[in-house]
Image (cartoon, rainbow, N blue to C red):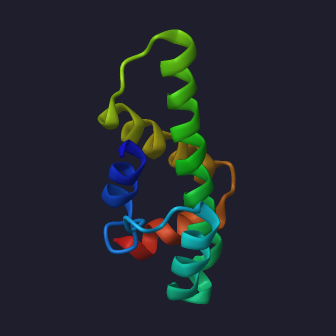
Amino acid sequence: MVARQIWSLGLPDFSPLPDDKVLHVWWMRILYLFPDNCKRGLNSLIILVAWSLWKHHNDIVFNGAVLNVQLVLKQICEEANLWCLAGASGLAHLEVAAR
C-alpha cells in the first residue's frame, strides 16, 4: 500500500491500479502512454522510485526504522537531483517537462 501511495503522489495520472500486480506490466503500459522524448526520463524515475522504496523497506526490516512516506518522497527528490547533476539527462528532461 505504501508503494502505491508513493507512486500516486509522484505520477498521479499513471500510478498503478489495484489490479496491477506485476511491476513490469504496469511499467510497459505507462511507458506506452508517454511521448518518446520522455521515455528515458520515465524509465529513470521508475528505477529511482523502486530503488528508494527498496532501501526504505530494508531500513525498516534491518534497522528498525519507522515507515515514513514523507521521508521516502524527500529522499526520492534529493536522489533525483543528484542523478540529474550526475548526467541523467532523461530524468532532467522529464523534470522540466513536468513543470
Q: In this rendering, is residue 21 above or below 55? A: below
Residue pictured at 33% horizontal, 36% vertical:
69
Q: Within the image, what quadrant is residue 2 found in? A: top left
Picture quarter with the C terminus: bottom left
Q: Indicate whether 68 appears above or below 82.
A: above
- Residue toward you, 92 or 49: 49
Identity of the residue drawn at 51% across and 78% down: 30
Residue 41: give x, y in percent of width and height.
Answer: 59, 68
Q: How many marks?
A: 0
> Which sits in the foreground, 49 or 41?
49
Q: x, y percentage for residue 80?
A: 53, 49
Residue 63 left/right relative to 2: right
Is residue 48 or residue 60 the one in the foreground? 60
Residue closer to the observer: 99 or 50: 50
- The residue depicted at 47 percent of the width and 43 percent of the height is 76
Q: Position of residue 87 (x, y in %)?
A: 69, 56
Q: Is residue 25 above or below residue 29?
A: above
On the rendered structure, is 13 left or right of 97?
left
Furthest-top residue in this view: 63
Residue shown at the point (60%, 84%) measured from the top left: 37
